[in-house]
Image (cartoon, rainbow, N blue to C red):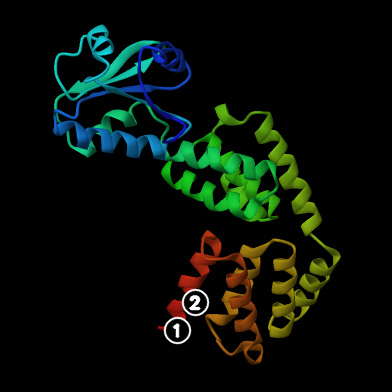
Amino acid sequence: MSDNIFNANAQNIQQLVEASKSRPVVMNFHSAQVPECAEITNALQAQAQIYPTHLVLANVDCDTQMELAQYFRIQGLPTVLVLSNGQPVDGFAGPQPAIAVETMLAKHLPAEWQLKLEQALPLLDAGEFDQAVLLLREALAAEQNGATLLSLAQALLGLKKTEEAETLLALVKLEDQDSRYTGLMSQLSLLKESADTPEIRNLQQQLAAEPDNHSLIVELGKALHQAGRNEEALAQLFDVLRMRLDAADGDMRKTFLDIVNALGSADPVASSYRRKFYGLLY
């Protein structure tokens, strides 16, 4: 049995009531004599396994724990009560489909984005930014708010993906622009300064004098990618590829695809330019 699933009895009921002060405790009053209880129990146990740190399930076998059933004034089975701060705050009596059980519990459990954020924060602290980004993209897709924007921006800055991080930070509302936001803006500024390398400036000056030099465009694209300026790199390369797919004897196409593949399928910049490139082919 999971660490958050218990068989309630007279000996542990006070501990369970105390536990409801920190997270919901779901009291499941059931009996083997009532077949409809089994579906409710299965649905509750499934939810308890999904939310092991956010939910406690206390199964009360009314065949052996009649005093508990009487104390909570249970009139029929199955009956489910949700305890919070020691008091019943929700529940139902009678048979219910699994979806109704999930809907009722959802009011007392973290949203999907909160779960993803909780999973990602230890990864951010450990510097495992690649893994954190995957979770935080899902969190942001489910809910755009200060927490999801700032956390994803932090992970992207850790990967030196300054362009996307800057886009996200621009979406942070004034009320969410706290000390964390200020720190990330400073980190962004420093990364942008370090990304403006002498090599890039030199290539840009050469390209200004020779705007049709495809080899220079390829070299600049590679340099921008190395500096984390991926959207700028892909834009430069794509502007030529849309006119000539064989530019620089195919080297421009290869460099473009190398950058797109390096960014990965979850990267929105890579996804956008991948679609644009396929549009040239078909």
Instruction: Give amino acid for label 1.
Output: Leu
**Which residue is at a point 47% across and 38% down the rendered structure image?**
115
Judging by the rendered image, the residue that carries numbered circle 1 is: 281
Circles 2, 1 touching at the beta carbon (< 8 Å)? yes
Identify whether 65 is placed above or below 166: above
Q: Which quarter of the picture shows residue 89?
A: top left
Name above or below for residue 269 compared with residue 132. Answer: below
In this rendering, would 173 be left or right of 57?
right
Q: Could you tell whether 35 is left or right of 111 in the image?
A: left
Kindly state the secondary structure of the residue where label 2 is placed: helix
Q: Quadrant of residue 216?
A: bottom right
Label ID, residue 191: none
| Residue at 74 percent of width and 66 percent of height | 226
Residue 70 location in percent, x, y? 22, 8
| Residue 170 can be seen, yes or no | no
**Label 1 SS:** helix
Of residues 131 and 61, the one drawn nearer to the viewer in this rendering: 61
Query: Where is residue 228 drawn, in percent x and y?
Result: 70, 61
Residue most toward the front?
64
Give the left or right position of residue 223, taking residue 250 as reference: right
Q: In the rendered image, which residue does mark 2 sit on?
A: 277
Q: Position of residue 1 (x, y in %)?
A: 41, 36
Q: Nearer the viewer, residue 172 or 8?
A: 8
